[in-house]
Image (cartoon, helix red, strand yellow):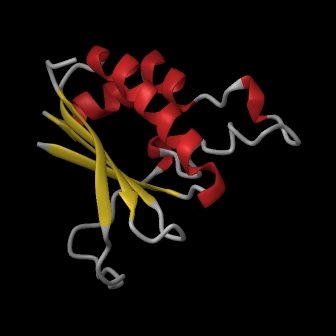
Amino acid sequence: MYVVTNRIDVPAERAAAFEERFIGNMRSNLPRVQGLARATLDRPVDPAAQYKVTMEFDSESDFETWRDSEAFRSSHARPAAAAPGNDGSGADAPKTDASKTEAPKAGAPRAATGPEHHIRIETYEGGKA
């Protein structure tokens, strides 16, 4: 099992639009992802905290295939409405890019961040639409 976790900054005033778009992308794109066992979207309890997305792949190569796929690019593309000065519906795109994220070195110390509190709002189970 290869697990990828991302944190996404979303301004509170754009949370509803972000959730709708993200869940729509999960439902339309994830069924095409080979080796994806499960994906979750968790809403932070504190609106100033980050959303958390976790994806569980059968292997690291399955993740790499997803990261390099058209489905990945489609899921992470900003909508046309994302242009500055529009209603902001596109500002919900992740500020992180899983394709550029490096895993910490084994045994490297990690700063303690304290507990995180989230509410699970969507789950995709591989093989189930």
Q: Residue 32's x, y, as percent?
A: 30, 14
Residue 4 higher or lower than 112, as above or below? above
Q: 10 left or right of 91?
A: left
Question: Is residue 64 shown above or below 40?
Answer: above
Instruction: Determine whether, in the image, residue 57 is placed left or right of residue 101.
Output: left
Vertical position of residue 33 compared to residue 42: above or below: above
Coordinates of residue 15 in the picture (x, y in percent): 55, 50
Residue lying farthest right? 85
Q: Quadrant of the C terminus?
A: top left
Residue 11: in sight, yes or no? no
Identify the image quadrant of residue 55.
top left
Q: How many marks?
A: 0
Q: At which x and y percent is residue 8?
A: 50, 54
- What's the residue at 27%, 17% (across, down)? 31
Give me the residue at 58% from left, 40% from top.
Answer: 17
**Is any part of residue 72 visible from this angle?**
yes
Quarter that holds the N terminus: top left
Q: Residue at the location (29% across, 34% down)?
A: 63
Residue 9 image-quadrant placement: bottom right
Vertical position of residue 27 compared to residue 96: above or below: above
